[in-house]
Amino acid sequence: MWKPTDPESFNRIVWKIAKQIPEGHVMTYGQIAAMIPPPDSVTPPDYKRLGARWVGQAMNATPSGEGIPWQRVINSKGGISLPAGSAAADQQRQMLQAEGVTFNDRGLVDFDRYGWDGPDEVWLKAEGLYPPPSMRSNRGSATQPKLL
DNA sequence: CGTTTGACTACGC
DNA sequence: CGCGTAGCCAAAC
């Protein structure tokens, strides 16, 4: 298990989860955080927001050369969280588009099409993690696109 | 060692 | 439904 004083291990878990995200799919910071058991020092309500921040920090410290698809982690709105217009943000958008992920006119990704609900239960159990809340619960909504 | 900032969110207006 | 603000933790100044 990991300790708050040892964010290293927390980052490792984040990266491991990110690596599971299939090509052409995305997960949010909050989803990944929700999969990781919070430390005893943090209450679940707080962790929901804190964890997302920690995941963001973990992604910021993502090591290169390990094949970690950092570009598949986006914010809860479905958009890229890096500074708009920055080279990094541009690169992320391009990498996702190269995988087949499309952005709408507002620069957001449609979770119904590209959102990923996490690894299978076997993997989760083996890693001691929780299944993340689905981001694509709005299926069938009248306000949402038809398609397919 | 006090301040500021951040690859986040939830909530109020 | 969009924009602004508060909150809490770590890391960078």
Image: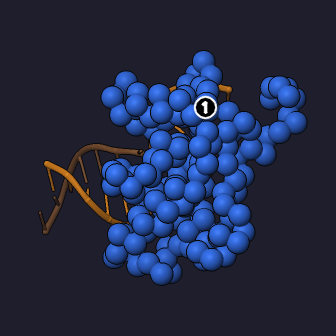
Chain colours: A blue, B brown, C orange
Above or below: residue C9 compared with residue A134: below
**A48 with respect to A53 (left or right):** right
Instruction: State the residue at coordinates (40%, 72%).
Output: A9
Above or below: residue A108 compared with residue A138: above
Image coords of residue A112 (percent x, y)? 74, 38
Instruction: State the residue at coordinates (33%, 76%).
Output: A5
Query: Looking at the picture, which amino acid does disc 1 mark?
Result: Val
Q: Say which of A82 and A44 sits in front.
A: A82
Residue located beneath label 1 in the image: A101
Above or below: residue A73 compared with residue A43: above
Within-10-Å neighbours for mark 1: few <14, some 14–19, many 20+: some
Question: Can you name the residue that lies furthest to the top here?
Answer: A105
Instruction: State the residue at coordinates (48%, 81%).
Output: A1
Above or below: residue A99 compared with residue A46: above
Q: Quadrant of the C terminus of chain A?
A: top right
Q: Chain of mark 1?
A: A
**A115 with respect to A21 (left or right):** right
Residue A17 visible in this rendered orientation of the protein: yes
Residue A57 visible in this rendered orientation of the protein: no
Image coords of residue A127 (percent x, y)? 58, 74
